[in-house]
Image (cartoon, grey):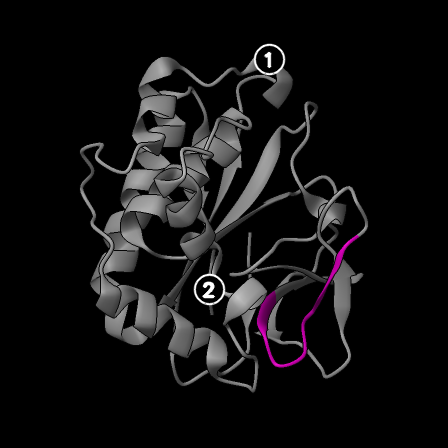
Amino acid sequence: MTLAVDAHPLLHLAAFETTLAAPLGETPSPAWLTALLALDAEAPVQRSETIRATSRNLLRYGGYKPTGRGKPASEYLVRAAENGKLGSINAVVDACNVVSLHSGLPISVVDLDRATAPFRVGLAEPGASYVFNTGGQTIDLGGLLCLFDSEGPCANGVKDSQRTKTHDGTRRTLSLVWGHQDLAAQVETATAWYRSLLEQLGAETQAAVLP
């Protein structure tokens, strides 16, 4: 698939499509995957304070404030793991969370059958928002780097849209690793590991075409 990307002076994006061998509800997370949700699990990438600060700088470009409840998703994962509250959700999300936790990079995953092409990455307009959970809570997206489908913004490095989240029937997903240009090597290593985890689950992955 092709993903259009608006000009951005800081962004180093990696994106790939995943096709599962069976519906997500029939693809349980194996013990080896959930074990990687621990902070002390061995991983080929390591988070750092520099990565945390640089990721915030990426999301800050455009006027968004990545602090408090609006901080990058990767920071939420670290806090949840520290508090013993980072549990399994489903195999696809667990793989995403594992890589984000250890790399320190925010990652999005969307159900491609709940989203509609064409797809584009760019900054959200002032006043844009979407619902991000089943409780109907919304996030103000103004100035935030987002993935857009034909209906509008649907994912970003903070909170993905409820509209395009995975579910038991999910068969195809699009993953985006949101990286700063200064973190290009970390992005590529994390993405390779992410794809390998999904392929160990029997899925097929294919890099998206980024113009």
109 on left or right of 51: right
- Chain-order first, disc 2 or disc 1: 1
Q: Is residue 180 visible?
A: no
Percent of width and height locating residue 151: 80, 61
69 on left or right of 202: right
In the image, is residue 14 part of the stretch drawn in magenta?
no
Q: Which mark is residue 26?
A: 1
Residues drawn in magenta? 137-146
Q: CA distance from mark 2 to mark 1?
A: 31 Å
Vertical order, 143 against 130 (above or below): below
Q: Residue at x 44, y 30 (%)?
A: 204
Around disc 1, counting alpha carbons within 10 Å, would you say few (fewer than 14), some (14 to 19), or many (20 or more)?
Answer: some
Percent of width and height locating residue 149: 71, 60
**Are discs 2 and 1 less than 8 Å apart at CB?**
no
Percent of width and height locating residue 170: 66, 29
Q: Secondary structure at mark 2?
A: loop
Q: Residue at x 58, y 39 (%)?
A: 173
- Number of numbered callouts drawn: 2
Vertical order, 194 against 147 (above or below): above
Return the residue found at the far front: 83
- Observer-nearest residue: 23 or 19? 23
- Judging by the rendered image, the residue that carries numbered circle 2 is 210
Q: Is residue 81 visible?
A: yes
Q: Residue at x 25, y 54 (%)?
A: 47
Q: Nearer the viewer, mark 2 or mark 1?
A: 1
- Observer-nearest residue: 15 or 138? 138
Vertical order, 202 against 112 (above or below): above
Percent of width and height locating residue 178: 43, 62
The amino acid at mark 2 is Leu
The amino acid at mark 1 is Glu
117 on left or right of 136: left
Among the 4 quarters of the image, the one containing residue 172: top right
